[in-house]
Image (cartoon, rainbow, N blue to C red):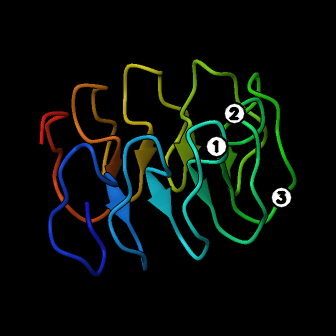
Amino acid sequence: MNGVHGPDTLSQCLMNGVHGPDTLGQSLMNGVHGHDTLGQCLMNRVHGHDTLGQCLMNGVHGADTLGQSLINRGHGPGTLGQSLINRRHGPDTLSQCLMNGVHGPNTLGQSLMNGVHGPDTLSP
C-alpha cells in the first residue's frame, strides 16, 4: 500500500505516506516523521519514536505496553491476540490483519497494511 508514491519492494516500506521508500529495517509506515528503526515505532503519527516494547503505532495517546493494543484509536486496550491496529472494526486475531483500515480481517499472509485496497500478498 503506497499513498503518494509508486510501488515499493518488500525491502522498502510496505506503506509509505509522505516519505520516500524505507528499508524493512526502517519504518513500515511513516506518517509525518522521518525514518525509524525497527526497534522504534513502525508508525508514529504525532509522537516521537517509541521502543518496540511500546506502541508500534501511536495516534494521539502515550506509549502502550506490548501486552496492550499496539495501536488503539477509539477502543480500550486490547491483548496481543487482538488487532495490532483497530480503526473501525472489532478486535482481530494476530493471524488476521495487523492493520485494517476499512476492510475486514486479513490473514497474516496478506497485507500488513490495507488502506483502501484488497488484500495483498506478503511477497512483493
The label nearer to you, 1 versus 3, is: 1
Mark 1 and 2 residues: CB-CB less than 8 Å, in contact?
Answer: yes
Asked whether disc 1 touches disc 3, contact meaning CB atoms under 8 Å apart, the reply is no
Give, as a three-letter code, the residue at label 1.
Answer: Leu
Residue at which label 3 appears: 61
SS assignment at label 3: loop
Instruction: List x then y, in percent, for residue 57.
Output: 64, 51
Q: Is residue 28 depicted above or below 65 in this figure?
A: below
Give, as a three-letter code, the residue at label 3.
His
- What residue sits right under mark 1 in the picture? 56
Residue receiving disc 2: 52
Distance from disc 3 to disc 2, alpha carbons, whole Å, reads 16 Å
Question: In this rendering, is residue 99 above or below 98?
Answer: below
Image vertical order of residue 5 relative to residue 1, above or below: below
Q: Position of residue 60 (x, y in %)?
A: 78, 66
Q: Residues within 10 Å of mark 3 (few under 14, many from 20)?
A: few
Label 2 residue SS: loop
Where residue 27 appears, x then y in whole percent? 50, 52
Q: Is residue 62 left or right of residue 11?
A: right
Mark 1 crowdedness (10 Å alpha carbons): few <14, some 14-19, many ≥20? many
